[in-house]
Amino acid sequence: MTRTAAAALAVLLAACGRGPAPAPAGGDAAPVPGAPAPALPAPAFVSAATTLRREPVDAPKVKGPKGKDVSNQLAVLQRGEKVTLLEAREDWARVRSSDDREGWLKRGALLEGEGIVEATVLVPADVFDRPDLLAANARRKIDPGTLLLVVKARAPFSEVNVSSGPNAWVLSERLATGEKEVSVAKLAEKARWLKRNGKEDEARQILALAREHFAGVPLVDALAAELEGGTAPPADGQPPDR
């Protein structure tokens, strides 16, 4: 055997003795084109006041850890509360609330998706059925202090979720996304829900909270006029499902 042939044979034997090629750094395979989206958990927003339940059933009571009947209601989550979506079924979703409590709610009361932004309006905002000035809806307005969830932008419009009826398109320049304005809109959402459910004293306590922490924000005065002046709150939400 010539020296050249012997060297070639040695290289071949060495190659056969090696194991499979090492995995890429990190141990994860390269992503496959067209693969499904990353698994849960994922962020989501409550789109209408709803009941957080122990079990995904409408029954008022369920079996507790010790076999005794316990209330199936854990809490009432208000529109605009941010939760973590842990599991999704056809009609139900298991979520983790801001206080790390896990439970089930009706999936129809959940707004899922990335990039959702909270907003409100400081003055009545015109509504458009489509992102086109020719699609103005003269019969519909968004009232100041309404809590909005912005799901899409298409300049100069933004698509917003409201708690009743279809999504609406508004001019983006009308939206207020400042922390204080959005915070007052959240308190207004809770106060309106309390008033609709006959808890006017608690609604006024929410107003007092808004005055204490967000004095100077014009929406506080608008909420005060609404609660104290007898003006009916906007019918943009429903009591939680029972």
Image (tube, helix red, strand yellow):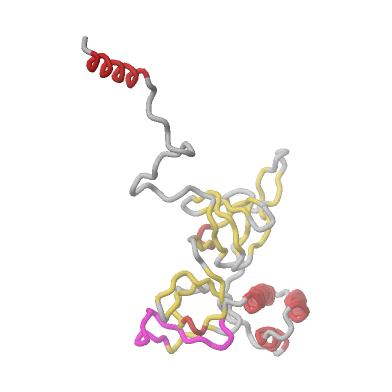
Image quadrant in which you'd find residue 9 = top left
Count numbered badges in the picture: 0
Q: Is residue 157 above or below residue 31?
A: below
User: Which quadrant of the figure contains the N terminus?
Assistant: top left
24 and 183: which is toward the camera: 24
Q: Is residue 47 visible?
A: yes
159 and 76: which is toward the camera: 159
Q: What residue occupies the far front of the structure in this picture?
A: 3
Q: What residue occupies the far top of the structure in this picture?
A: 1
86 and 37: which is toward the camera: 37
Query: In percent of the image, x 36 and y 44: which residue is there?
Result: 32
Image quadrant in which you'd find residue 139 = bottom left
> Does the segment drawn in magenta span residue 82?
no
For residue 234, side relative to residue 36 (left or right): right
Q: Is residue 82 above or below residue 145?
A: above
> Does the segment drawn in magenta span residue 127?
yes
Residue 51 coordinates in the image, percent (x, y): 62, 60
User: Which quadrant of the figure contains the C terminus?
Assistant: bottom right
Residue 239 coordinates in the image, percent (x, y): 61, 69
Query: In percent of the image, x 67 and y 52: which residue is there?
Result: 101
Query: In percent of the image, x 45 and y 74: which residue is there?
Result: 159
Q: Is residue 196 visible?
A: no
Residue 105 coordinates in the image, percent (x, y): 58, 56
For residue 69, side relative to residue 110 (left or right): right
Query: In percent of the image, x 50 and y 72: which residue is there?
Result: 150
Q: Which residues are magenta?
A: 120-137
For residue 192, side relative to residue 3 (left or right): right
131 and 19: which is toward the camera: 19
Residue 42 coordinates in the image, percent (x, y): 53, 54
